[in-house]
Image (cartoon, rainbow, N blue to C red):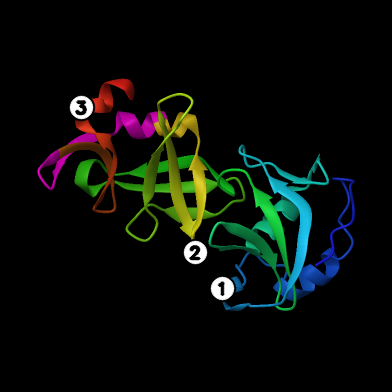
Amino acid sequence: MTVESTNPGTAPKGLESLIAAVGGTRKLPPVHMWNPPFCGDIDMRIAADGTWFYLGTPIGRPALVRLFASVLKREGEKYFLVTPVEKVGIKVEDAPFQAVEMAVDGVGASRKLSFRTNVDDLVSCDAEHPLRFEPEDHTGGLKPYLHVRRDLWARVTRALFFDLVEMGETRNLNGKEFFGVMSAGEFFSMAPAESIAGLR
């Protein structure tokens, strides 16, 4: 998979072969079944805010970003773009995706949360697509993430995180009180209940 263009307004060379390999439809290709040889790293990076860069230049075509996102694969802590015949490494600063919109259906235990990512994945938050919350070192707050597919996660935007906190409730888990949010019959814990003062 060769990516050689620095102009965000044009398609990199090799894109045509990539499209031919994965198809031009929105249906996600079966990247989990592809195990091509590793062809080295390329200078492509997904910034912490979800922006994709090539050779230091933002990729300005949303359709091109969605195409690359559809062939993204994670192995351990490393990320790759894959086709049936090639695999190249890229850098991901935080999570590869951003959860940018949320829909809420129902309340309390019957609530169902659905999210749209910055690459137009639609994800229902449930046992297979959980929310997780990690400590944010420099602020003392929390970093929320949503599982999208196959160990690929989306960072939930700060605005949506505040919405999740507003919907939050306290539950007893193994004898300890935790603050979290319900979706699709699952309780996703954010933090011990005694620490929620810093969240609300």
Residue at image position (83%, 64%) is 15
The residue under label 1 is which amino acid type?
Answer: His
Determine the CA span between mark 3 and mark 1.
41 Å
In screen coordinates, is 17 left or right of 166?
right
Residue at image position (64%, 62%) is 70
Q: Classify mark 3: residues with Cα within 10 Å, few (<14), some (14-19) or many (20+).
A: few
Q: Which secondary structure, mark 2?
A: loop
**Residue 45 % position (x, y):** 71, 47
The residue under label 2 is which amino acid type?
Answer: Arg
Write down the residue under mark 3: 194
Write down the residue under mark 2: 150
Residue at image position (86%, 55%) is 11
Write down the residue under mark 1: 32
Determine the CA span between mark 1 and mark 2.
8 Å
Image quarter hosting the C terminus: top left
Q: Which of marks 1 and 2 is nearer the N terminus?
A: 1
Q: Which mark is on residue 186?
A: none
**Residue 175 % position (x, y):** 9, 43
